Image (cartoon, helix red, strand yellow):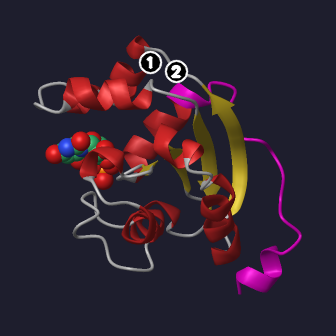
Amino acid sequence: MEKTFIMIKPDGVQRNLVGEIIGRFEKKGFTLKGLKLINVDHAFAEKHYEDLSKKPFFNGLVEYIVSGPVVAMIWEGKNVVLTGRKIIGATNPSDSAPGTIRGDFAVEIGRNVIHGSDSVESAQKEIALWFPDGPVNWQSSLHSWIYE
Ligand code: UDP
Ligand code: MG
């Protein structure tokens, strides 16, 4: 089953949005397969965002991610990468629809509360970086109530 990497950024943790955000993925029907609260250092944040290293906002982005603990998660489900991005909303909260996490809880692009993998390939890369021991092995007993 498809997996994605979701991270609640330091502003989301500081603003007490952890429970709200986890609840949205849970209630959708996706399954939590990894979870940790962690402070990352500059080198780790740079590695996570290495594809953006040439962007003018890169240094500010790295400072943002190291500014406090983040909640790193693996979520599993059918089409969870793309659907997770829809639940999160557009990168710039000015463009994120109401009802999405960024649309409901964020104002500025540099404080947009949450990260989600943008493809199955980047999800695999990000899960390997953040969870070297891999996902937790369990199956939800709700499976047959969510999937036909
Ligand atoms: N970002 C920023 N300024 C920009 C574009 C992006 O500060 O002009 C930050 C923002 O926090 C965003 C992150 O860099 O979430 C990663 O950018 P990406 O384009 O990958 O957006 P995402 O995949 O997070 O929607
Ligand atoms: Mg991205």
Q: Is residue 140 magenta?
A: yes
Which residue is at a point 48% across and 64% down the rendered structure image? 84
Amino acid residing under circle 2: Val
Residue 99 rendering spot, x and y as whole percentages: 45, 79
Q: Is residue 115 magenta?
A: no
Which residue is at a point 60% across and 61% down the rendered structure image? 21
Amino acid residing under circle 1: Phe
Q: Are marks 1 and 2 in contact (CB under 8 Å)?
A: yes
Q: Which region is colored magenta?
A: 129-148
Whether ligand 1 has any atom under 8 Å from the Cβ at mark 1 is answered as: no
Residue 75 rendering spot, x and y as whole percentages: 62, 55
Q: How many marks?
A: 2
The answer to whether residue 134 of the structure is visible from this angle is no
Q: Say few, some or many: other residues with alpha carbon within 10 Å of mark 1 (under 14 / 14 to 19 / 20 or more).
A: some
Examine the image and state in which quarter residue 20 appears. bottom right
Q: Which residue is mark 1?
A: 44
Describe residue 62's horizontal placement relative to residue 136 as left or right.
Answer: left
Please name the predominant secondary structure of the magenta segment in the image. loop
Q: In what quadrant of the picture does the N terminus appear?
A: bottom right
Q: Which residue is mark 2?
A: 40
Above or below for 47 versus 83: above
Q: In what quadrant of the picture does the C terminus appear?
A: bottom right
Which residue is at a point 77% across and 42% down the rendered structure image? 136
Q: Which of pointers 1 and 2 indicates the residue nearer the eye?
A: 2
Residue 5 rendering spot, x and y as whole percentages: 52, 46
Examine the image and state in which quarter residue 52 appears. top left
Above or below for 135 versus 141: above
| Mark-to-mark CA distance, 1 and 2 | 6 Å
Describe residue 91's horizontal placement relative to residue 10 as left or right.
Answer: left
